[in-house]
Amino acid sequence: MMDNNQQNDYKLLKGNEVIALAAIRYGYDGFFGYPITPQSEVLETLAVEKPWETTGMVVLQAESEVASINMLYGAGCTGKLVFTSSSSPGIALMQEGISYMCGNELPGVIVSVGRGGPGLGTIQPGQADYNQAVYGGGNGDYNCIVLAPNSVQEMADCMGKAAQLTFKWRTPVIILSDGVIGQMMEKVILPPFTPRRTDAEIAAQCPWATNGIGLKSRHYNALSTLEFDPQVMEDRNRAMAEKYKRIQAEEADYELYRVDDDTDYLIVAYGISSRVSMKAVDILRENGIKVGMLRPKTLWPFPSKAISKLSEKIKSILCVEQSEGQMIHDVRLATEGQATVYHTGRSGGMISSPVDVVDAFKSMARETITKNWPKGYWIK
């Protein structure tokens, strides 16, 4: 909710540009990254803004994505608020470092602006990195918190939320966007400037950090223990698992659109798919079809309880993703068999239109609502 003094303070910006500008204003200490389409504007905007001259923020173009994530790892050890950004194959290269950060319970923000795949794929947008972000490609038992913005404004807001969550839970936070939102321009209100924390403030807020202040220090290593003690490793894993349970209980977030007591059908979508689906819901509602949408704002933890509750009364669910179907598995688990779940979407860099979603909905619902379908509705 904006205050009255901010009502007219709009800027027209790309999603990727907003990531950089919001990081400066939220007091981030550093950025380490490597250019890759469709997110290169993050580093380019930081280079233009030169925050090292105004806030002291470090901006470094690393030699690779592997170097970027390991710089994030090292800075996280000191309690600094740092981030990196990349796209699909670049994030794939970072998986080992992300696993190391989770294993040592270190903060860090990772912005992933998805493109079509698999492999090098295409520079066109996509949402086929859901599994990569939510389930991870690194080894071991770990989770990252995953935020899913669906607008340029939320790209800015997520930089603030990620900064808070990554220190609250001492785990990396991934902002999973896509090439459409990264490249599109919208009105946005940037946050006010937050001063970067001093070294003394970091030392007080992050007693676990190794920062060279005082006599206390901690040694961080890629290995859990130097003794290779499996019992110590299991104890740590179980303690982290308990933390992940608390995150699931406290941080799952979602938004409902046109869902009410008489809703018969539900669309579940995130990111750009939710923007497309909102229009599809409007079209269907205008034609007398009682459909609503649930948008997960966190992909991990997933809003399973909300979907489960809605599944008790709805007839079926349409999962909309710009992939061949990844989030659909979590939706199906959440329904606990109470509702049938269908999927629609494009892949390889193609994006669904609202009419595509409407047509997929018609196919899904044909058997149960054909008799009551408004005459002359069929859209071509």
Image (spheres, rainbow, N blue to C red):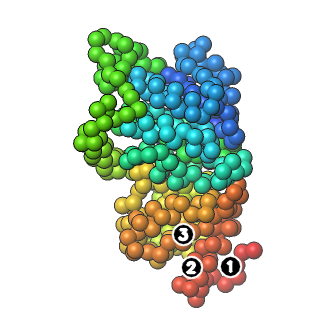
Amino acid tagged 1 = Tyr
Q: Position of residue 285 (x, y in %)?
A: 58, 70
Q: Which numbered disc, 1 or 3, marks the residue that appears first in the sequence?
A: 3
- Residue ID at (53%, 84%): 368
**Total numbered badges shown on the rendered structure:** 3
Q: Which mark is residue 365?
A: 2
Left or right side of 21 for 379: right
Q: Quadrant of the C terminus?
A: bottom right
Q: Earlier in the sequence, mark 2 or mark 3?
A: 3
Outermost top residue: 214
The amino acid type found where label 3 is placed reads Leu
Whole-number angstrom distance, CA of label 1 to CA of label 3: 19 Å
Q: Are marks 2 and 3 in contact (CB under 8 Å)?
A: no
Give left or right: position of 230 versus 87. left
Mark 1 or mark 2, which has the lower sequence index? Answer: 2
Disc nearest the viewer among 1 and 3: 3
Crowding around mark 2 (Cα neighbors within 10 Å: few <14, some 14 to 19, many 20+) is some
Residue 377 image label? 1
Residue 153: x percent and y percent? 57, 40
Camera-nearest label, 1 or 2? 2
Residue at the spot 43% in from the left edge and 50% down from the top edge = 300
Q: Tell me the distance, in whole angstroms, between the alpha carbons under discs 1 and 2.
A: 14 Å
Q: Which residue matches tag 3?
A: 318
| Quarter residue 325 falls in | bottom right
